[in-house]
Amino acid sequence: MARAAVKTKMPKTIAPDVLEDMFYHIVLARALDDRMWILNRQGRAPVVYSSNGHEAAQVASAFALDRGRDWVVPYYRDLALVVAMGMTPREIFLHLLARRDDPNSGGRQMPAHWGLKRLNILTSGSVVTTQMLHAAGLALAAKRREEDTVAVAYFGEGSTSQGEFHEAMNIAAVWKLPVIYFNENNGYAISVPQRKQMAVADVAARAEGYGMPGVVVDGNDPVKVYEVMAAAVARARRGEGPTLVEAKTYRFVPHSSDDDDTAYRSREEVAEHKKSDPVITFETTLRELGLLDDAKVADIRARVKAQVDDATRFAEKAPDPDPETLLKHVYYGD
Amino acid sequence: MAVMTYLESVRETLRQEMRRDPRIIIYGEDVGVRGGVFRVTEGLQAEFGEERVMDSPLAEAAIVGTAIGAAINGLRPIPEIQFADFIFPAFNQIVEEAARIRYRSNGDFGVPMVVRAPYGGGIHGALYHSQSVEAFFAHVPGLKVVMPATPYDVKGLLASSIEDEDPVIFLEHKGAYRSIRGEVPDERYLIPLGSADVKRQGTDISIISWGMTVNFSLTAAQKLEQEDGVSAEVLDLRTVRPLDVDAILATTKKTGKVLIVYEDNLTGGFGGEVSAIIAEHALFDLDAPIRRLAGPDVPAMPYAPTLEHAFMVTPDKIHDAALNLARF
Ligand SMILES: Cc1ncc(C[n+]2csc(CCOP(=O)(O)OP(=O)(O)O)c2C)c(N)n1
Ligand SMILES: [Mg+2]
């Protein structure tokens, strides 16, 4: 590569090995995601919810946290987030296939309903937006104990139409909670485009009405997302309260494996967005910075493929939940 | 041992529990400076500070939703819903989230919180300050639903609810707050959730009830004894989930006649469940059909005193229904 062509500056905020690590997790998440769709189309995984297209935003947001100490409160879109938080490919595929040892739910929940205490990933249900209040509550407890941990809630732009979005934003601001609301704005709620969801251009614009900062960031740019998140995290740790971050992103695949997105968006539109696919653009950036070359990329791709293959084999051989466990864990001690 | 009102028992129990457990926080609408619209939390903010007794925004989903997160992260929140009638904005958080977080996470997470809510009518509260909401929540596995009738039970059941690792809906009858008095020991004690209590022994008929109508049933039982020579047993369920099935079957077998009394409207009320359990397990011990005495099937309790009185289950109505059944 001609060094003279370098147009990207090395970010001061992120160490080179961290940039590489972010790239690794972005690639790993995409590879897991691609494999899930293959398994689905082969009839081996009944349903898939994807983070395909959202990886940069999710991974970079996680990297701005003290992972393992801070809390994340995900929704079904957040595969790449939980990968970055440390959930292993095996654990992810045990969940996908609803196996006994799925650490998220023991095979009880649909795929992509994340939750793992070991990693401070709060369990998530299917009802959108309820999690925004849970994040505020986690933050309330941390604040009450005078810890400097933060909680981050993730949600789509469609979910901001729910009343609980308003309630969460308001109570978090009034109580100055160390919480960050991380909106993944991909422009669609299943088939419904943003313009039918809200009469403003930016979700972040609403922050002002609650008395907290609102920041729009390019969700395809991991460095920018990291910087915006790092600032929000620092503010929360200082006790100055919540921030609303809006990452503009796009999902490259249908809402789920049961959706057909050709019904509501053109192939041209999807192709246009794929030009800024973070898996490709971030690789280009890191090559320009001299952090990646062909050999390194090949090595990363080989490691990722080995992990995905291993996880697939492992989960497919894993036992199903025992029907006897149906009645367990309704109450403590069951 | 002090004699106190039902309301004072709630307050003193909260105080005693907060003194021993720093994880407890209380919040809700007006619970701070004002001490709640019923004064249940009066003086608690002064004693424990604004960090532990907080006025919240007027938003029930937020009150319960944040309590879920706080409970998961190590606190023991006791959120207050100002009136049980206003718990429905939080229904989603209670039913879809709190109740199933343990189950859906395969035991990884739990939600030890106590949602307190004043329920019940006969206090000129009209449609939106009078409802009995227990049936909605008793239907939901993962929740516990507690409905004390006396100041003594308030203390033991509230302490148990706070210690419990799972979400508890703690329903306090507004009519009981100042009208029901009783002895309450000073020392701490626990009443296990799921243990009913025979509040009055009897041999001719069993009255099974929970919450405020237990007190009305006791008044009716006294009149039955004195005026009609009928010996009525009164069983107080105390918690509708978990349910003390053994106690229900025991009293059924003892008297052979069961009147189920509740303030909620009749259809789909919790009395239907009690009745089904008896029919399934003790049909041949019955000497008469199971009877239910409950509120009428109208959407909620009206305001005008004549209408309100017509809605309410009263000691006289219980007396008449019980006498009728005793003579079957
Ligand atoms: C309360 C509720 N209503 C409806 C649904 C069904 N549903 C699931 S995802 C979804 C769209 C969500 O869109 P958005 O919040 O933008 O998230 P995205 O999937 O685009 O990331 C809908 C309507 C639901 N899960 N919860
Ligand atoms: Mg969306």
Image: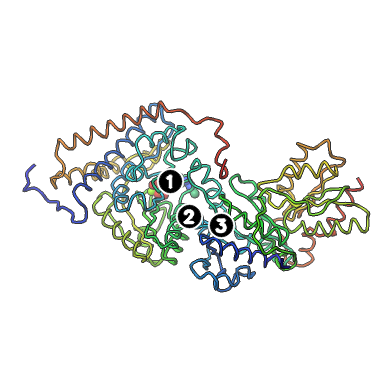
Pick the residue in front: A153 or A149: A149
Q: CA distance from mark 2 to mark 3?
A: 25 Å
**Location of residue B51 in the rendering, given as x and y in whole percent from the top left corner:** 48, 67
Disc 1 residue crowd, few under 14, some 14–19, many 20+, Cα 10 Å: some
Pick the residue in front: A170 or A204: A170
* Residue B53 in view: yes
What residue did someone put label 2 on? Answer: B74
What residue did someone put label 1 on? Answer: A117
> In the rendered image, which quarter contains the N terminus of chain B?
bottom right
Three-letter code, disc 1: Lys
Disc 2 residue crowd, few under 14, some 14–19, many 20+, Cα 10 Å: some
Q: Quadrant of residue A272?
A: top left
> In the rendered image, which quarter contains the C terminus of chain B?
top right
| Color encoding of the figure | rainbow
Pick the residue in front: A295 or A319: A319
Would you say the residues marked 2 and 3 are in contact, meaning their CB atoms lie under 8 Å apart?
no
B94 sits to left or right of B131: left
Would you say the residues marked 1 and 2 are in contact, meaning their CB atoms lie under 8 Å apart?
no
Looking at the rendered structure, which numbered label has been put on residue B83? none
Q: Is residue B291 above or below residue B220?
A: above
Looking at the rendered structure, which numbered label has been put on residue B89? 3
Three-letter code, disc 2: Gly
Three-letter code, disc 3: Pro
Name the chain letter of the residue that bears numbered label 1. Answer: A
Would you say the residues marked 3 and 1 are in contact, meaning their CB atoms lie under 8 Å apart?
no
Q: CA distance from mark 3 to mark 1?
A: 28 Å
Closer to the camera: disc 2 or disc 3? 2
**Location of residue A244 in the rendering, given as x and y in whole percent from the top left corner:** 36, 59
Name the chain letter of the residue that bears numbered label 2. Answer: B
Q: Quadrant of residue B301?
A: bottom right
**Location of residue B163 in the rendering, given as x and y in whole percent from the top left corner:** 58, 54
Name the chain letter of the residue that bears numbered label 3. Answer: B
